[in-house]
Image (tube, helix red, strand yellow):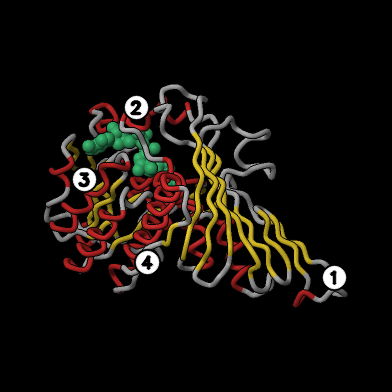
Amino acid sequence: MAQEKKLGISVIGLFMGRNMLYVNRHDSFRCTVRTICDTIPERLKQNKDEFKIPFASTNWEDVVDRDDIDIVGIFTPDHLHFPMIKKALEAGKHVICTKPMVISIEEAKETVALVRKYKRKFLVGQTRRYVRHHQEAKDLYDSGKIGKPLFAEANYVHGDIWNVLDRGAWRYEVPQDIIYGGACHPIDHLRWYFGDIDEVFAYGATSPVDLRYPQDKEMNFLISLKFKSGLMARVLLATGIHTPPGGHHTDILPMEGFSVFGTYGNIVNYHAVYREEGRHDAPRQEVNFSRTEAVEDFDGKEYSGHLMSVLKYVMEMEECILQDKQPLINEVEGAKVISACSACWESVKTGKAIKVFNEF
Ligand SMILES: NC(=O)c1ccc[n+]([C@@H]2O[C@H](COP(=O)([O-])OP(=O)(O)OC[C@H]3O[C@@H](n4cnc5c(N)ncnc54)[C@H](O)[C@@H]3O)[C@@H](O)[C@H]2O)c1
């Protein structure tokens, strides 16, 4: 397809957002990155040159309201998402926003209202739903082989957080809110399987593993959830710990742990075991899912990790715009995750179980 016919993309924030620039290395995309923004001039120039981006600016407002742009990709620190979402929608642009969509229930409600008002497509880049082994586990669950869920758990275990704090001072200066920024992953993962959450109960605790992070703000959380279906689940959200033995992608305590225990069998992180229809005399079936670091082929090139997930969700967004479909994680899905996070904070602060607002 000729370059001028492609949908134009602006990318704001070029660490996680740099992944989106790889779109320009694939002719199969019907969109192309035309403008980029970052407040670090050297990072901006390096990416502009490397990916041959036509226009770059250190001021994000310069790359939003432009005739050659259809989609704005937002990858700035969490607290900057909402003003950028608002401006992009007001300028008539579709939006891809990395997680967390926003950082309060008020911003979530306003985002939903803006998307409806301007009738744009909105996709939240919750990367887990685009990771192959999570997709394989979800397919197995959807096939019915695990049976009905009895209970579930999802974790976000990010040890050695100093590696991330070293990269961006905003994470301890603003600081990043660990429930919105971290719990959004396991909560979205659980919502993907089980739908709306009715109620949460959460404990939070501070941690001295990195003294740059405010010592009065919680980093580790245990969250209990009750879904509207009645299903119960739990979330371990640990960012104030050392990395468990073996690292982030072992069976010991994977960063993106997810388990569902069903009437016919269980999915536990990278593995599943079940018996046909749960019959006690049926042979045990075992399935091992590929791991996150596994390389995937994307249109003739091999990618893994966040880069692969970002390319998959850009392709989905392109399809949604051109075929008038809804993204898997649209503004309402995104808002319900934020709403559950907000209820978790209220529970930590009050010591009570809190109902989750889902009426978006
Ligand atoms: N799994 C995932 O989907 C995933 C993984 C990592 C980060 N994230 C999210 O991506 C976002 C960015 O995280 P990161 O790890 O890349 O952070 P980072 O601090 O490493 O990088 C942020 C970038 O944004 C730039 N920036 C800051 N303020 C800006 C502004 N006003 N205008 C333009 N650019 C600006 C910075 O210069 C930097 O290059 C966060 O919301 C984070 O939660 C998502």
Task: Report the quarter where the C terminus lies.
Answer: bottom left
First of labels 1, 3 by sequence position: 3
Q: Is mark 1 within 8 Å of ligand 1?
A: no
> Which residue has dot 1 on it?
283
Q: CA distance from mark 3 to mark 4?
A: 36 Å
Give the foreground label among 1 and 4. Answer: 4
Do the numbered discs 4 and 2 sit on residues whose CB atoms are within 8 Å? no
Where residue 18 appears, x then y in whole percent?
Answer: 35, 41
Position of residue 285 relative to residue 155, above or below, is below
Q: State which image quarter holds ligand 1.
A: top left
* Label whose residue precedes the other's in the sequence (4 or 2): 2
User: Is 175 placed above or below 69 here?
Assistant: above
Q: In what element is the residue under mark 4?
A: loop
Read off the residue under disc 3.
35
Looking at numbered disc 2 in the image, what kind of residue is underneath it? Ala
Mark 1 vs mark 2: which is more N-terminal?
A: 2
Q: Is 134 positioned to the left or the right of 354 in the image? A: right
Q: CA distance from mark 4 to mark 2?
A: 34 Å
**Residue 270 location in percent, x, y?**
66, 53
Pointer 2: what residue?
Answer: 169
- CA distance for labels 1 and 3: 56 Å
Point out the frontmost of discs 3 and 4.
Answer: 4
Looking at the rendered image, the disc whose residue lies closer to the viewer, 1 or 2, is 2
- The residue to which callout 4 is attached is 358
Q: Residue at x 65, y 73 (%)?
A: 148
| Corner quadrant of residue 322 | bottom left
Q: CA distance from mark 1 to mark 4?
A: 41 Å
Q: Position of residue 218 (x, y in %)?
A: 45, 36
Amino acid of disc 4: Asn
User: Is residue 75 at all visible to an observer of this figure?
Assistant: yes
Q: Residues within 10 Å of mark 2 (few under 14, many from 20)?
A: some
Given residues 204 and 153, the one toward you in this image is 204
